[in-house]
Image (tube, rainbow, N blue to C red):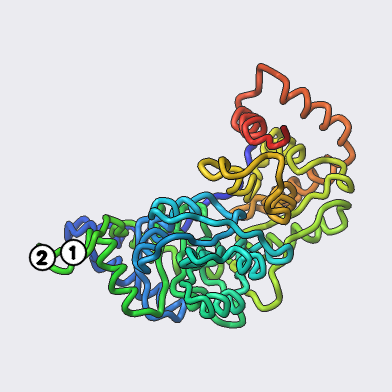
């Protein structure tokens, strides 16, 4: 039996199909139909922001914001994030500059950020990680002093809040992802949240080829619109999110009880002022104390049908096309390196049953008792020319991303 890393929640499809039927009846499939307009209003109201601009993906949302802010030169971001963050910067003809993370929050360190500012820096693109917010207050103070723009990649933070203020109210804009791997999704999709009305107006033009009216084009735009069927699904799923979030938090609590006394295993905790949505169950593995490296445990779990993820490994500075700037002999971002070598995200989704959680935890605990056998099996696996089909991608990743030369 396979336990996937994540599985979207199954909901009563009646509401969705009712909306879908109306879409087919009206033949209005895209371009600001009633579902997208209602969707934008609902998401804006939930997060207490003036404007929500629905888009076809979180990545394109980041690109639109960077374009809409008229940025030039360099944008400082974190290497501990999904590759889309830096790609969005580079796609806009800007240069991503990495600053190391804070060891407590796993988000960009304000002190390291300040060290990276040059005369070419136009903005900072911070990333809220696993529901944890960046130090938004320090970052905004630094940016204001240097006349920089502030954008936050908030892909993990749907309906999360910092000191009681919902995501979407920080920086110039914050971008959500509604990919199917997120607690709230629209199959594919995303949204830009902002309180800047001028920016919101530009973004609405940019996402629709720059059209200001019929046959009137005022900007270099692109097609980034969310379609009606995606918005309809989002509206159908939205009422289930509070219940889903509560269940995910119960799952996390069970993991913590069952793994809480495991030597060499620690949990990533949100800071007290943050209220997350419960999606990410994050552990850190200390190889010396646990007896296995994170990669050895990761491979062992996959071999036994438990699909965990190494979010975020190996750090963007070791991914192409950014890796060319760094030597494998240097360690430019020690905290990112330390965390990315230790982090492991466990399955956490609404339909994950307690028996499966217990089985996952038992497998992790037992792996410590089998560490000699697992290490020998792991080394043999890496040297083997015949890898089991269910481990081919895992082994390919282990070999390809080996950084020790």
Could you tell me if residue 309 is visible in this image?
no
Give the x, y percent position of residue 199: 34, 74
- Of 305 and 119, nearer the camera is 119
- In the picture, the quarter occupied by the N terminus is top right
Location of mark 1 (residue): 211
- Of 233 and 193, nearer the camera is 193
Q: Secondary structure at mark 2?
A: loop
Q: Quadrant of residue 33?
A: bottom left
Measured along the vertical axis of the image, is residue 302 above or below residue 259? above
At x 86%, y 46%, the residue is 290
Residue furthest to the top: 385
Q: Which mark is residue 214?
A: 2
At x 49%, y 75%, the residue is 171
- Of 105 and 49, nearer the camera is 105
**Position of 139 compared to 381: left or right?**
left
Measured along the vertical axis of the image, is residue 28 above or below residue 170? above
Crowd class of label 2 (few under 14; some 14 to 19; many from 20; radius 10 Å): few
Residue furthest to the left: 215
Q: Secondary structure at mark 1?
A: strand
Give the x, y percent position of residue 21: 25, 57
Q: Are marks 2 and 1 in contact (CB under 8 Å)?
A: yes
- Of 198 and 175, nearer the camera is 198
- In the picture, the quarter occupied by the C terminus is top right
> Disc 2 versus disc 1: distance between alpha carbons?
7 Å
């Amino acid at each position: 039996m396979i336990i996937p890393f994540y599985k979207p929640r199954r909901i009563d499809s009646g509401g969705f199909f009712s909306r879908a039927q109306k879409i087919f009846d009206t033949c209005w499939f895209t371009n600001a139909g009633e579902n997208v307009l209602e969707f934008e209003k609902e998401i804006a109201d939930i997060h207490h922001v003036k404007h929500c601009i629905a888009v076809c993906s979180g990545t394109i949302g980041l690109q639109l914001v960077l374009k809409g802010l008229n940025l030039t030169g360099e944008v400082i971001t974190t290497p501990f994030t999904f590759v889309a963050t830096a790609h969005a910067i580079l796609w806009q003809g800007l240069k991503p500059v990495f600053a190391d993370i804070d060891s407590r929050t796993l988000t960009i360190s304000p002190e390291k950020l300040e060290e990276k500012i040059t005369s070419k820096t136009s903005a900072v693109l911070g990333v809220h990680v696993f529901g944890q917010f960046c130090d938004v207050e320090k970052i905004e103070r630094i940016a204001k002093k240097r006349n920089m723009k502030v954008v936050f990649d908030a892909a993990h933070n749907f309906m999360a809040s910092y000191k009681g203020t919902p995501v979407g109210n920080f920086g110039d804009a914050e971008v959500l992802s509604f990919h199917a791997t997120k607690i709230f999704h629209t199959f594919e999709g995303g949204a830009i949240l902002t309180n800047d009305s001028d920016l919101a107006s530009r973004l609405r033009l940019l996402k629709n080829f720059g059209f200001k009216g019929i046959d009137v084009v005022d900007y270099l735009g692109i097609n980034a619109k969310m379609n009606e069927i995606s918005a309809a699904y989002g509206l159908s799923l939205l009422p289930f999110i509070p219940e889903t979030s509560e269940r995910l938090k119960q799952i996390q609590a069970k993991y913590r009880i069952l793994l809480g006394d495991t030597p060499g295993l620690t949990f990533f905790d949100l800071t007290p002022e943050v209220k997350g949505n419960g999606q990410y169950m994050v552990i850190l593995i200390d190889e010396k104390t646990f007896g296995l490296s994170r990669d050895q445990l990761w491979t062992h779990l996959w071999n036994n049908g438990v699909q965990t993820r190494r979010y975020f490994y190996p750090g963007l500075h070791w991914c192409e096309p950014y890796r060319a700037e760094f030597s494998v002999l240097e360690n430019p971002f020690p905290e990112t390196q330390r965390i990315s070598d230790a982090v492991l995200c466990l399955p956490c989704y609404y339909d994950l049953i307690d028996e499966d959680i217990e089985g996952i935890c038992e497998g992790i605990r037992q792996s410590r008792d089998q560490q000699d056998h697992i290490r020998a099996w792991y080394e043999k696996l890496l040297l083997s020319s015949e890898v089991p089909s269910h481990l081919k991608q895992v082994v390919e990743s282990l070999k390809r991303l080996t950084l020790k030369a």
